[in-house]
Image (tube, rainbow, N blue to C red):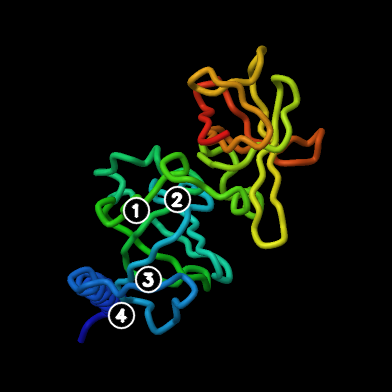
Amino acid sequence: MIEKPRLVLLVALVSFAGIIGIYGYALSIEPTPTSIHDISSEQVGTMVLVEGTVRSTRAAWDGGMLLELWEPGAQGSLEVHLTMAGMEDARNLNKLLNGTVVRVQGMLDLYNGEYELIVTSYQDLEIISTTDSSLVPISTLLELPEVYEGAPVRLAGEVGFVQGSDYFTMRESVGNYTYTLTVRTSFDQTLRDVNGFPVLSYDRVEVRGELDYNPTRGRWELLVEGAGQIRKLSG
């Protein structure tokens, strides 16, 4: 007859081996493509493939990284746990800024009642686009500023009015609504683009900068350092 302490230890070892076996099996099968909105309890314990925008990043308890992924139309978000083992072969973690669009696969789990995607290899995380590699609509920037705050972004739009060399506004019309964003510069001369052309009202320009909240003005602004970050598209 097996003594009780040894029996408890044996049961624990068998259970742990079972969990490892299930996880190993999950890793050996093709992931199921799904949207964050459609994730369900039936998928827990299986491999899934999702695409979303990084909303926030923070350190995980195991030394890895936690990403909060968001997608348009989804209620809530999905937490992605890139384990410490998965970070050992990482090369582009510095690109995982808020607003970065990624495609990632891993095993879906439940943690504290919330869905969590466990990723054990950085190779299972693909960067689709970064905030400065693709144009971000002004409307998206202003509707979800917390996603892009502090991240380098690239956007295009029509110049509204130019206020000296300090700032100008950019606008984008969506239906009957016009989104307006203030662009604040560090220039001490007439506002010009990368080629030396003056930036005027009604010009269409492309701008690179960082989104920041101005508490004095009570608004979000795009901070631009240097004329080389502004390029006239037309005008």
CA–CA distance between discs 2 and 4?
A: 36 Å
Q: In what element is the residue under mark 3?
A: strand
Give SS at disc 4.
helix
Residue 56: x and y, percent? 53, 50
Instruction: Compute the Cα span from label 3 to label 1.
Output: 14 Å
Q: Earlier in the sequence, mark 3 or mark 4?
A: 4
Front residue of 35 and 161: 161
Asked if residue 174 can be seen in this view, the reply is yes
Callout 3, which amino acid?
Leu
In the displayed structure, does residue 141 sit left or right of residue 68?
right
Residue assigned mark 1 = 83
Give the residue drawn at x 47%, y 43%.
131
Quarter of the image where the N terminus is located: bottom left
Crowdedness near tag 3: few (<14), some (14–19) or many (≥20) residues, C-alpha within 10 Å: many
Q: Pointer 1 and pointer 2: residues touching (CB < 8 Å)?
A: yes
What's under tag 4, amino acid-wise?
A: Lys
**Image spot of residue 108 (x, y percent):** 37, 71
Q: Residue at x 63, y 53 (%)?
A: 139
Task: Tell me which amino acid carries mark 2.
Answer: Ala
What is the CA distance from the residue labelled 1 to the residue labelled 4?
A: 35 Å
Q: Nearer the viewer, mark 1 or mark 4?
A: 1
Q: Is residue 149 above or below residue 232?
A: below
- Asked if marks 2 and 4 touch (Cβ < 8 Å), the reply is no
Instruction: Identify the residue position indicated by label 2 in the image.
Output: 60
Location of the C terminus (image quadrant): top right
Residue indicated by mark 4? 4
Residue that carries the numbered disc 3 in the rendered image: 108
Q: Which residue reaches farthest left? A: 28
Marks 1 and 2, the one that precedes in the sequence: 2
Disc on the earlier residue, 3 or 1:
1
User: Marks 3 and 1: which is nearer the front?
Assistant: 3
